[in-house]
Amino acid sequence: MKRWDLIVVGAGVAGLTAGIYGARSGLETLVLEEKIPGGATAEAPLIENYPGFPKGTSGMDLTRRLVEHAERMGATIHQLEKVITLDLKAKEKRVKTDKAVYTTTALILASGSHYRTLGIPGEEELRGRGVSYCAVCDGAFFKGGRVMVVGGGNSAGVSAIYLSNLASNVKLAHRRDQLRAEEALVKNLRNRNVEIMLNRDQRD
């Protein structure tokens, strides 16, 4: 059972950033990730609003740079290691994973988020068979086909733009009367073969 000065649970952008600062502060830092580093950010085909990348970058490239930065600072990153339990009662916190047990006096939870589902009939049954939550991961399956992206924020906008290069027809459906995405993304959408459908209830 190894002791660390700092353990970070989650290796998305927040977790990797915490790892960078922890290691820079001279703390022996461990970052634990149940999947691969990057989280939802790694799946983004294009990121245009991250400082220092005026021409944009992919989520995978940004993740790679963050991992390299964290490791260069001295942080240790364990991927494919799932945290099972946390014991936070004592001063020495205990973190149990599916591979080992660690102790630390400082713990940061950067567990990220999960995809929001629509909760409509057939969604779960068709997951991976027409229903997808990652345009980059599954976009190639829809090449030349007709697709619909549900949402009105930046993620939905970026996904629709990405898919417009693959699919023959792309619709973007949003429940409100205007998109929440940044204006630059909205302008890009309107210049592509993306049909924007507003005021659409998920049951329509």
Image (cartoon, rainbow, N blue to C red):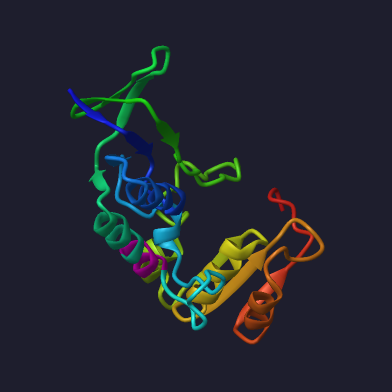
Magenta-span inclusion, residue 62: yes
x, y percent for residue 77 = 25, 46
Which residue is at a point 42% across and 47% down the rendered structure image?
A: 18
Which residue is at a point 36% across and 71% down the rendered structure image?
A: 140
Quadrant in which residue 116 is drawn: top right
Q: Relative to 67, is 111 on the left or the right?
A: right
Q: Relative to 23, is 107 on the left or the right?
A: right
Q: Relative to 103, is 108 on the left or the right?
A: right
- Please tell me whether residue 2 is drawn above or below residue 34 in the rendered image: above
x, y percent for residue 20 = 36, 52
- Please tell me whether residue 102 is drawn above or below residue 195 in the rendered image: above
Q: Nearer the viewer, residue 67 or 144?
A: 67
Quadrant in which residue 61 is drawn: bottom left
- Please tell me whether residue 12 is drawn above or below residue 165 in the rendered image: above
**Quadrant in which the N terminus is drawn:** top left
x, y percent for residue 192 = 60, 85
Q: Which of 200 and 43 is in front in this view?
A: 43
Q: Residue furthest front?
A: 26
Q: Nearer the viewer, residue 165 or 68?
A: 68
Magenta-span inclusion, residue 115: no
Quadrant in which residue 181 is drawn: bottom right
- Can residue 61 be seen here? The reply is yes
**Which residues, given as a range, are shown in magenta?**
59-64
Question: Would you say the magenta stretch is mainly helix, strand or loop?
Answer: helix
